[in-house]
């Protein structure tokens, strides 16, 4: 068998069939769930957010504050 005895192979392939379009039906139940999801998510107040940041050792939740704006209580200044 020689290479010349093989039939010529067509390099032109037919285009692939288009994918069938999937129709997604939006029902009232699915749209209501999407809307109500954010409404019932628990919202943390700033103190709770700070406690979570401290417990998880996260620096992204902590803000840097100048020392002049902090309220420091020194035991040496108290009179007893």
Image (cartoon, helix red, strand yellow):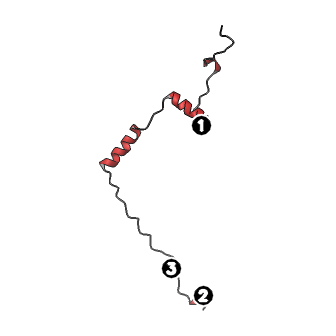
Instruction: Tell me if label 2 and label 1 are in contact, CB under 8 Å.
Output: no
Query: Alpha carbon of mark 3 to alpha carbon of mark 2: how far?
Result: 15 Å
Residue named by callout 3 = 10
Q: Is residue 28 above or below residue 1?
A: above
Query: Which residue in the structure is indicated by mark 2?
Result: 3
Q: Quadrant of the C terminus?
A: top right
- Point out the image quarter for the N terminus: bottom right
Residue 50 figure quarter: top right
Q: Upstream in the sequence, badge 1 or badge 3?
A: 3
Q: Few, some or many C-alpha atoms within 10 Å of disc 1 (few <14, some 14-19, many ≥20)?
A: few
Residues at marks 3 and 2 touching, judged by CB atoms closer than 8 Å = no
Q: Is residue 13 left or right of residue 59?
A: left
- Secondary structure of the residue carrying tag 2 is helix
Q: Nearer the viewer, mark 1 or mark 3?
A: 1
Q: Residues within 10 Å of mark 3 (few under 14, many from 20)?
A: few
Q: Position of residue 31 (x, y in %)?
A: 34, 46
Q: Residue at x 32, y 51 (%)?
A: 26
Residue of label 1: 56
Q: Nearer the viewer, residue 17 or 39?
A: 39
Q: Quadrant of residue 35?
A: top left
Name the element at disc 1: loop
Say which label, 3 or 2, has the lower sequence index. 2
Determine the residue positioned at 58% across, 88% down: 4
Between the C-alphas of marks 1 and 3, the distance is 64 Å
Looking at the picture, how far across and down is residue 9, in whole percent?
52, 81
Q: Is residue 60 visible?
A: no
- x then y, percent, for residue 10: 50, 79
Mark before the other along the chain sequence, 2 or 1 = 2
Say if 56 sits above or below 19 in the image: above
């Amino acid at each position: 068998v020689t290479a010349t005895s093989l039939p010529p192979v067509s390099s032109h392939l037919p285009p692939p069939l288009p994918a069938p379009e999937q129709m997604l039906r939006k029902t009232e139940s699915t749209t209501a769930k999407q809307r109500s999801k954010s409404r019932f998510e628990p919202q943390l107040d700033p103190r709770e957010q700070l406690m979570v940041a401290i417990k998880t050792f996260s620096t992204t939740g902590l803000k840097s504050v100048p020392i002049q704006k902090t309220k420091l209580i020194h035991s040496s200044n108290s009179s007893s």
